[in-house]
Amino acid sequence: MKKVIVLVAAFGLTMVMAGTSMAQNIKIGIFDEQNVLALMPGIQKVDTLLNQYMTDSLNEQRDYAISEFKRKDSIFKADSAKMNSSMKSIMQRDLADQFAKLQNWQQYQNQMMQQKQGQLLQPFYDIIGKAFQEVMAEQKYNYVFKPDALLYAEKSEELTLRVLAKMKIPLPKEIQDQIKALGISTSGTSNPSPAKAPVKH
């Protein structure tokens, strides 16, 4: 019986030591790509392109939809008495669909703006993602969390400066000083071209 107790105790101690060793080897990082995105060259152009998209595309679509609804509604009112039931039903459904779209135009516009914003930001996210993956591979992080997803970690590192250093983009002097203060090396990495927002179609 004593041998069994000794074996169990030894096994438990081994597991505790193994767990402690594993915990000591875990490397946790914290990263928020939005902080990097705000410093990307050319990011200010996205708002300009979004405004142009609303003016040149969405507003024109809305004006055309209103014009078409009024035109078809006038035709229906003028000719509905001479239409057979089948044609009248088709036109009524068409008018109802167009009216519903106009009623929900703000929702449609918001969806299209979000889609366009995602399209414009994707080249920037691609560059950030590449630098992030390189930092992950070099520093061998086990886990990386967003700031709002990690409640507590005994020891964690903020990856933003490492990712910015890897990207080699123009940075404010205070951020450059923070990178130097941490002793982060920027040698031996390629210098990606500044991200350019895609041409508006």
Image: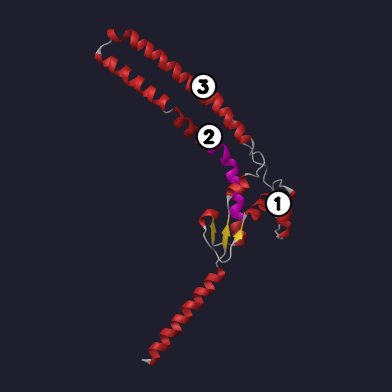
Residue 28 appears at what percent x and percent y? Answer: 56, 62
What amino acid does circle 2 point to?
A: Lys
Which residue is identified by label 1? 175
Front in this rendered view, residue 177 or 140: 177
From this viewpoint, which residue is outermost toward the left? 85
Q: Is residue 123 magenta?
A: yes
Q: Which residues are magenta?
A: 117-134
Residue pointed to by mark 3: 60
Q: Which residue is mark 2?
A: 116
- Magenta: main secondary structure equals helix
Please name the amino acid that badge 3 sits on. Answer: Glu
Up the image or down, 196 lies above or below 22; here it is above
Q: Position of residue 44 (x, y in %)?
A: 64, 37
Picture layout, residue 21 above or below residue 65: below
Q: Are marks 1 and 3 in contact (CB under 8 Å)?
A: no
Describe the element under mark 2 as helix, strand or loop: helix
